[in-house]
Amino acid sequence: MNDVFFDMTISPFWIISTSSTIGIIFGYISTKLTNRAIEKGLPSRKEIIYPTAKDIQVYLVEGRKQFQILVFAILFLIFFLIITMGYLYFVPKSILMFFSNVAFWIIIILIIWAVRPIERKQVQRQLKKELVKQLS
């Protein structure tokens, strides 16, 4: 797969920016399509539950564990994205690294959209405050 890309001389920065732009565009489109598919099936799956204080405590503990794992996964993916960008910079004619860079952008955008780490942290803080109020 090496040296299959372009026969003409192209700047490595141009290759990296092109692959990143394509990856970001496809990542955005993927999140919009995923969001639309979720919203279509949401009314049939909506269910109202009333968790107890004990259930909320369990949710908070499990959520904290899951949050740490997901943040580690995001950092791991960003690390590999940087590696593919570096390799693409030094070997700009590698189509495999070009597509890897595009794929990593798509995956990172989808995971960050799905995980939403900042919103999750805010919800955990709010649940913790409400739980303390309820138990007091």
Image (cartoon, rainbow, N blue to C red):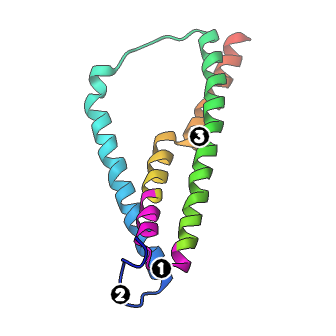
For badge 2, the amino acid type reads Asp
- Camera-side residue: 16 or 57? 16
Contact between marks 1 and 3 (CB within 8 A): the answer is no
- Camera-side residue: 54 or 128? 54
**Residue highlighted by disc 2:** 7
94 up-or-down from 68: above or below: below
**Residue highlighted by disc 3:** 70
Contact between marks 3 and 2 (CB within 8 A): the answer is no
Looking at the image, which residue is at 57% across and 36% down?
A: 120
**Residue highlighted by disc 1:** 92
| Relative horizontal placement of residue 91, taking residue 42 as reference (left or right) | right
* In magenta stretch: residue 99: yes
| Relative horizontal placement of residue 30, taking residue 118 as reference (left or right) | left
Alpha carbon distance from label 1 to label 3? 31 Å
Alpha carbon distance from label 3 to label 2? 40 Å
For badge 1, the amino acid type reads Pro
Q: Disc 3 vs disc 2: which is toward the camera? A: 2
Helix, strand or loop at mark 1: loop
Q: Residues within 10 Å of mark 1 (few under 14, many from 20)?
A: many
Q: Residues within 10 Å of mark 3 (few under 14, many from 20)?
A: some
For badge 3, the amino acid type reads Leu
Alpha carbon distance from label 1 to label 2? 11 Å
Looking at the image, which residue is at 42% across and 55% down?
A: 106
**Residues shaded magenta:** 88-103
* In magenta stretch: residue 123: no
Helix, strand or loop at mark 3: helix
Helix, strand or loop at mark 2: loop
Q: Earlier in the sequence, mark 3 or mark 2?
A: 2
